[in-house]
Amino acid sequence: MGNTRRSKRDKPQGTLRVHLADNIKALRDLKYKELLSETARNKALAKDSDVSASQIQRIVKYELGTSVDHIEAIARALDTRPQDLLTPYFAAKHTSGPITLRTRRRRA
């Protein structure tokens, strides 16, 4: 009998995880636009939300799903509601300028 268990790496990204990451990135970049690097923006968001910088980095890179508590803390730091972070294209509709939201495809 073969091993039917799939590796986490081989699973497609969840839709909510993609929307969460895309919205956080867009709103983070808007709020911390004076900071030149993505790392600096992640650290500022981490400080304001009391979520670790590595956690923020993994969320925006689609590598980590996160808890409701973290979503609420990040939403507070970004001056939005938690449900807005999970709404498809929320940030694109509520920010000025082009924002590229993308979806991750399953690895072949």
Image: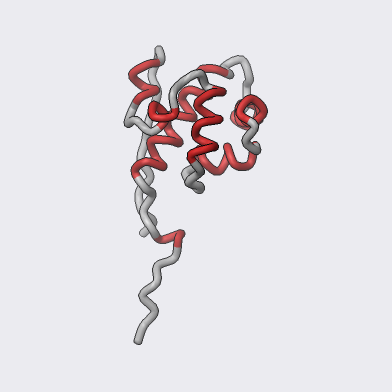
- The residue depicted at 47 percent of the width and 44 percent of the height is 62
Determine which quarter of the picture holds residue 52: top right
Q: Nearer the viewer, residue 10 or 4?
A: 4
Query: Which scheme is used to colour this image of the protein?
Result: secondary structure
- The residue depicted at 44 percent of the width and 65 percent of the height is 7
Relative to 86, is 33 above or below? Answer: above
Relative to 76, is 10 above or below? Answer: below
Q: Is residue 84 left or right of residue 30?
A: left
Point out the residue furthest to the bottom here: 1
- The residue depicted at 39 percent of the width and 29 percent of the height is 83
Q: Nearer the viewer, residue 55 or 70?
A: 70
The picture places residue 28, in percent across and down from the top left corner, at 53, 24
- The residue depicted at 59 percent of the width and 41 percent of the height is 55
The picture places residue 70, in percent across and down from the top left corner, at 54, 37
The picture places residue 5, in percent across and down from the top left corner, at 39, 72
Specify the quadrant that holds the N terminus: bottom left
Q: How many marks?
A: 0
Q: Nearer the viewer, residue 100 or 1?
A: 1
Relative to 104, is 27 above or below? Answer: above
Point out the residue furthest to the front here: 69
